[in-house]
Amino acid sequence: MLYRRAFVNELLTNALAVFAVLVGIFVTTLWIRFLGRAASGVMPPEAVLVILGFSIVNYLPVLLSVTLFVAALLTLTRMARDHELVVWQSVGLGATAWIKPLLMVTLPVTLVIAAISLGLGPWAVQKSAEYRSQVESREEVSTIAPGLFRESKAADRVYFVESLGLAGDTVRNVFVRSEQHGRLGIIVAGEGRQWVAPNGDRFLIMENGRRYEGVAGRLDYRILQFQRYLLRVEPFEARMVEPSIKAIPSWVLLLNPTPEGQGELQWRAALPITAVLLALLAIPMSYVNPRSGRSFHLVAAVFAYMIYSNLLSVAQAWVAQGKLSPWVGLWSVHLVMALVVSFLFYRCLSVVPLLAGRRP
């Protein structure tokens, strides 16, 4: 039990470190992307954290699968480099002896991956789509960013504010361009704010400004100077968008089989299987020449993961397009991967080394 305890402890330590790094990279990338959208006025700033949280939940199965693979590979590679695997092998512990302690850590994480990919992941995609729809249905003045021209969702108004007030509830130097019944209207005000009437109607109150109204190309423009001007903000109804296949619950896809739905369902079921096969692949990959260095194992791991992941994506696309039978589908890719893992274990247990060259 000594080798199991030492292996599991080091594996968990490496897994936590790898998971923290992967989540940090993923969150940073999405954070920068969402902040760019918020700065351009496409997304409200308060929506960044919510959509980021849903995105993390959706991609968590992939992050956990990669974490198990990399952590197992780092642990076993370190043991091989320090000749610990040779010591354990001398007392009768071959490559297959590491399967049981590895599965002790992998199987609980695999259950979490299955729960997220089959249940929680589609729920997160659905809630993210609903939240985006709510954000799109909000009044256009709520998404105005200082220093940027912002067009209304109905494409009949253009807003521009130079800066925000000290309290953050007012704006300075407001510019509004609107067009109604063929007449152009331009409003310029020194200050503006929102106001909600008792009946629920929303207004943009502008103070100390002017309104220019007329027809382009004609000289009969009207100029109105005002101390307070109320501009009603028309509500915008979000368009009904058909839910994405990724947002449909798994039980619905199972009860209503379609080529696209079967491809998505097989992809969700493939994630926990992928986690187990990749974790097992790390064992024979660590039994290579120690002189090859640590970078060789990482490069080989990235190469193996890219091939496996791309084959799964291609098989899913073919199933969704009806080019590949669902009975073959992604299961064929798993079968090929399982055969490759079995062959590598056989090479580790045989006399011939895994990457042995031919003698002259």
Image (cartoon, grey):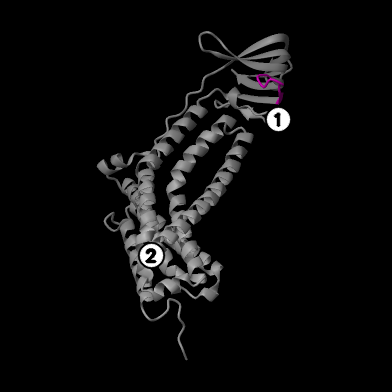
Q: Is residue 40 visible?
A: no
Q: Dots 2 and 1: beta carbons under 8 Å? A: no
Tell me, for residue 167, which label it has, or none: none
Compared to 46, does 120 lie above or below? below
Tell me, for residue 98, which label it has, or none: 2
The question of residue 93 being in magenta is answered with no
Q: Residues within 10 Å of mark 2 (few under 14, many from 20)?
A: some
**Mark 1 — residue?**
147
Q: Amino acid at mark 1?
A: Gly
> Which range of residues does the magenta coloring cover?
162-170
Residue closest to the eye, 189 or 8 = 8
Location of residue 293 in the rendering, given as x and y in whole percent from the top left corner:
55, 71
Location of residue 93 in the rendering, given as x and y in whole percent from the top left corner:
37, 71
Location of residue 111 in the rendering, given as x and y in whole percent from the top left corner:
35, 48
Between the residue at mark 2 and the residue at mark 1, the CA separation in whole angstroms equals: 61 Å
Q: Residues within 10 Å of mark 1 (few under 14, many from 20)?
A: few
**Left or right: 355, with 163 as reference point:** left
Location of residue 132 in the rendering, given as x and y in whole percent from the top left corner:
49, 32
